[in-house]
Image: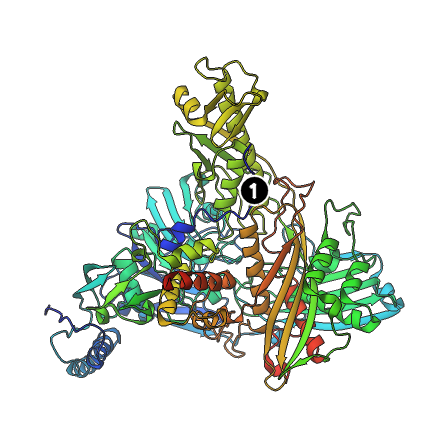
């Protein structure tokens, strides 16, 4: 038999394409005759466009058109996953700084960019509200978002809080953050009659198609969206944003293909962000540290046109055993762009919860790991039913042992090394992964050609997480063929249906259908072989045929063998099968332990050691799974120590809309990470034992760092990021 | 259009000043009088009038490529939009992310921060020109071996930067590699694997 590829650290099959520059991303595909588009964006945050004078821009060499709200046809504003509430260039209202007010088309990029600067826009400006602090109206509870209520009540939390033996009450906060994938958002739109092809930096080719279908009133089957590679998304390319719709509209008006690439600065107002966030948390417990009450009110930044909350409190309401819970997710709308999903939406609220548990642990004198074990739950806190296959307790044990947690100094500020205070901290990690929609079902097709090679087709995406590689492993295992005999074709809405690569749902939702399609292909080829008098396997019962290395064998007589290539070759036509399956949503878990060093005089924090252990069911590919851990840990460091977007208090414009002012971790900031996996198949999984995982490792990192800073210095910082001004 | 001169290899102070003046004259939106003044500062036969383009020759991956560009066109946009060499990526267009890193006469250069007209006469190597036929460069091999990328958007820049980092002698230890590779952002954050890959490739290159 084949040695199974699933589970092994198989190298990425797209590696060569990526290290040679051969991989074609959506902004790389040549489109003959395409014009370059460039957006003109609003310099005011609130008010109205009074007049647009494009004359200077139109006089610039190479400029083909300047389109404004006066030129664009009326479009239908799509709902989710278009989370903006309005389409720009449909009227004169300005809802935030950086909102598009015109689009310039020119022959070259340089001409379009300069002409965009020459478009003169006059505004009637009103003073904007630039932050939640300046909002005149009080926070309010928005309507349920995608069927999920913003208020959760269990038991009597207020009474339990009043009666609690021990109480922790604290306020935590975090600023606006931006995804900043290295690849800017890019759209290339090409109309042929009423058929539309879009090369799009999309985490979901089908989501993009559905949004364009609604906006332009076009049947989905006339639209094709292509994203064979994606240069990072982190949630920013899951929803569809205005520039995509505007580029498509401009291409139709101009009668020419149009390519538009956002600038880095435009990405700070046009592609969503993690909302500024406040969290008021009250935790009641017994003297031993057992939770009895959790009362939480959060406040997230909304916008004037969009009320959805993306900083979810899943962890507060479900992660630990607590009979009395009251969570309210409120919001306030300043004059800022709409927020959206950003890698691990739970992270902001999770920071407060995991910090509060650390505060509780110190208050009751219980080790933070023991406190979490004491409050561990094996049942779903909302339904009361057992959580199948949860192995969070194993994560605590594995990571604590590997880290050497038992040697932790018992007092804060007890360890000094030269000029630096050394501290250790830990936190639980938890993430809810999504299910793909039921209709249409996620479907894969597998085609076996006369060359014996298998081609798997599915409209999913590889956003850097390793989809190409993992579905190749699945097909190779299911069919008994080598990995290099499998080609994965993805990132095209014309392929069999799959959902968005978000919510850690890709592997969870596509490997089941891929496995089914591949097994069906294997069975079909075996059936052809045993029915073919020319095959050495003629007449053998199908269940006595095994497959490995591209060959078919009799299970007891290995000399009787045939091959995929020979069977399909004799058959004279490719064998094609499909498979469909809907995945179940669920949770992945983990524990993260960190060491920090805080400079006694400079207040600078370095993360010097990280150990993680995760439970995500079966590990499909250790190499790509570890990649998600490295990424998540580093994102957590960014969140804890540096990342924050600053809005000017008077103009509500982003002050640091670049990568020199918005700091993200660089190579020198990234510590060695020791990653462990429980690697135990989840019996409830529809994905070969695996669960959705990618967004799990970040969730606990900011709190683990903050807890370690407290252990190092005795200073509790509840307002992220932990910059040195807060420690000096 | 006057024939552009072919300056000596590398950039001298004179060619840099000249190119800068050319750019100032053609990209700023100036009144006519200011134009005349700016043009007066331009010396020599390579002066290009505002809004005009020039035919230039770039030596890319060992091949001379003739293209017509405005003086304000960056080397990055010349590679991507004119020569179809899209392996080099644009991440920020302001020299902050390093995704556009190429080798110019063996040195790592952020191609978004240099103009194509300034790079005539230089040997430019992009990620497409690194492998020797089918045989990958040791850095490329090491990046695959160590899983030193995820999405791949920064990878071309990381690889080119790593080649130069090793050549500069800045790959002596993991700590040194971390410092000298910190001009290339990786938002997927494969940094640990990048350090391992560069260290591994450095050993191989030295061998």
Q: How many marks?
A: 1
Q: What percent of the width, then of the height, locates residue A550?
A: 47, 30
Residue A426 higher or lower than A224, as above or below: below
A2 or A367, which lies in front? A2
Q: Is residue A619 above or below residue B22?
A: above
Tell which of B51 and A350 is nearer to you: A350
Q: Chain of mark 1?
A: A
Q: Which residue is mark 1?
A: A6
Residue A136 in view in this figure: no
Coloured how? rainbow
The image quadrant where one finds the C terminus of chain A is: bottom right
Compared across the picture, whether A481 is left or right of B118 comes to right
Viewer-nearest residue: A348 or B122? B122
Observer-nearest residue: A101 or A702? A702
Q: In the rendered image, which quarter contains the N terminus of chain A? A: top right
Q: Quadrant of residue A493?
A: top left
Q: Residue A263 in the image: x percent, y percent?
A: 40, 65
Residue A575 placement (x, y as % from top left): 45, 26
| Left or right of residue A180, residue A166 in this image | right
Count residues near mark 1 (Cα–Cα under 10 Å), then give few for <14, some for 14-19, many for 20+. many
From this viewpoint, is residue B39 visible?
yes
Q: Is residue A608 above or below residue A516?
A: below
A470 to the left or right of A42:
right
Residue found farthest to the front: B207
Mark 1 secondary-structure assignment:
loop
Q: Residue A195, how many percent across, how many down?
A: 37, 41
Quarter-wise, where is residue B163 in the image? Answer: bottom left
């Amino acid at each position: 038999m084949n040695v199974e590829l699933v589970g092994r650290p198989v190298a990425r099959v797209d590696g060569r394409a990526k290290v040679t520059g051969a991989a074609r991303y959506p902004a790389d595909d040549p489109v003959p005759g395409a014009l370059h588009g460039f957006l003109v964006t609003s310099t005011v945050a609130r008010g109205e466009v009074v007049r647009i004078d494009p004359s200077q821009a139109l006089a610039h060499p190479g400029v083909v058109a300047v389109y404004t709200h006066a030129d664009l046809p009326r479009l239908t504003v799509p709902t989710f996953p278009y989370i903006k509430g309005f389409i720009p260039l449909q009227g004169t209202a300005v809802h935030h700084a950086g909102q598009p007010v015109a689009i310039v088309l020119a022959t070259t990029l340089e001409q379009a960019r300069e002409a965009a600067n020459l478009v003169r826009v006059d505004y009637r400006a009103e003073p904007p509200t630039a932050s939640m602090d300046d909002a005149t109206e009080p926070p309010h509870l928005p309507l349920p978002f995608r069927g999920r209520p913003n208020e959760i009540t269990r038991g009597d939390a207020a009474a339990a809080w009043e009666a609690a033996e021990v109480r922790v009450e604290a306020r935590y906060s975090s600023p606006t953050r931006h995804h900043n994938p290295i690849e800017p958002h890019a759209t290339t739109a090409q109309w042929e009659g009423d058929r539309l092809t879009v090369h799009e930096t999309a985490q979901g080719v089908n989501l993009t198609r559905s949004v364009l279908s609604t906006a332009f009133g076009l049947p989905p089957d006339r639209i094709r969206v292509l994203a064979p590679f994606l240069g990072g998304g982190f949630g920013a390319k899951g929803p569809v944003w205005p520039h995509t719709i505007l580029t498509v509209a401009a291409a139709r008006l101009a009668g020419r293909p149009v390519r538009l690439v956002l600038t880095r600065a435009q990405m700070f107002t046009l592609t969503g962000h993690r909302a500024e966030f406040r969290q008021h948390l009250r935790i009641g417990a017994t003297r031993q540290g057992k939770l009895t009450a959790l009362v939480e009110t959060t406040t997230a930044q909304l916008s004037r046109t969009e009320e959805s909350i993306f900083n979810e409190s899943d962890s507060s309401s479900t992660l630990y055993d607590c009979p009395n819970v009251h969570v309210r997710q409120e919001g306030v709308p300043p004059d800022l762009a709409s927020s959206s999903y950003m890698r691990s939406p739970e992270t902001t609220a999770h920071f407060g919860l995991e910090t509060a548990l650390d505060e509780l642990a110190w208050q009751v004198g219980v080790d933070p790991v023991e406190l979490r074990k004491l409050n561990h739950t094996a049942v779903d806190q909302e339904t009361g039913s057992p959580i199948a296959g949860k192995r969070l307790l194993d994560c605590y044990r594995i990571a604590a042992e590997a880290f050497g947690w038992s040697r932790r100094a018992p007092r804060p500020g007890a360890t000094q090394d030269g000029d630096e205070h050394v501290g250790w901290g830990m936190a639980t990690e938890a993430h809810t992964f999504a299910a793909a929609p039921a209709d249409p079902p996620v479907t894969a097709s597998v085609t076996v050609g006369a060359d014996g090679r298998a081609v798997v087709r599915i409209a999913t995406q590889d956003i850097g997480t390793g989809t190409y590689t993992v579905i190749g492993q699945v097909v190779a295992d299911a069919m008994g063929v080598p990995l290099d005999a499998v080609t994965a074709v993805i990132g095209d809405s014309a392929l069999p249906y799959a959902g968005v690569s978000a919510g850690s749902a890709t592997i969870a939702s596509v490997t089941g259908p891929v496995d089914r399609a591949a097994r069906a292909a294997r069975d079909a080829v075996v059936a052809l072989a045993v029915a073919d008098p020319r095959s050495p396997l003629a007449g053998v019962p199908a269940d006595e045929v095994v497959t490995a290395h591209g060959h078919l064998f009799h299970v007891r007589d290995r000399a009787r063998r045939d091959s995929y290539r020979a069977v399909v070759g004799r058959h004279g036509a490719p064998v094609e099968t499909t498979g469909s399956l809907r995945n179940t949503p669920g949770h992945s878990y983990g524990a993260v332990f960190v060491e920090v060093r805080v400079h006694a005089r400079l207040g600078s924090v370095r993360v010097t050691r990280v150990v993680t252990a995760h439970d995500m069911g079966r590990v499909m590919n250790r190499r790509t799974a570890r990649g998600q851990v490295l990424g998540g840990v580093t994102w957590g460091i960014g969140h804890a120590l540096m990342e924050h977007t600053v809005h000017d208090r008077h103009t509500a414009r982003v002050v640091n809309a670049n990568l020199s002012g918005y700091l993200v971790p660089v190579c020198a900031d990234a510590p060695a990470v020791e990653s462990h996996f429980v690697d135990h198949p989840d019996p409830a999984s529809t994905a070969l034992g695996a669960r959705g995982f990618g967004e799990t490792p970040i969730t606990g990192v900011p709190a683990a760092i903050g807890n370690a800073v407290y252990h190092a210095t005795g200073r509790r910082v509840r307002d992220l990021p932990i910059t040195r001004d807060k420690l000096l | 259009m006057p024939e552009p001169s072919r300056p000596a290899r590398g950039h001298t102070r004179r060619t840099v000043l000249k190119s800068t003046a050319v750019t100032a004259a053609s990209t700023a939106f100036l009144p006519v009088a200011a134009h005349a003044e700016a043009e007066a500062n331009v010396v020599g036969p390579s002066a290009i009038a505002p809004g005009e383009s020039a035919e230039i020759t770039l030596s890319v991956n060992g091949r001379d490529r003739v293209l017509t560009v405005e003086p304000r066109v960056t080397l990055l946009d010349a590679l991507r939009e004119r020569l179809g060499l899209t392996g080099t990526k644009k991440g920020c267009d302001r020299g902050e992310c390093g995704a556009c890193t190429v080798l110019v006469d063996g040195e790592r250069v952020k191609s978004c921060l240099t103009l194509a007209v300034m790079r005539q006469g230089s040997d430019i190597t992009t990620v497409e020109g690194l492998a020797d036929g089918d045989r990958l460069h040791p850095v490329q091999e090491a990046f695959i071996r160590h899983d030193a990328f995820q999405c791949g958007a920064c990878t071309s820049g990381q690889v080119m930067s790593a080649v130069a980092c090793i050549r500069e002698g800045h790959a002596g230890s993991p700590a040194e590699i971390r410092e000298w590779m910190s001009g290339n952002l990786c938002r997927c954050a494969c940094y640990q694997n990048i350090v391992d890959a560069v260290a591994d490739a450095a050993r191989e290159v030295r061998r």
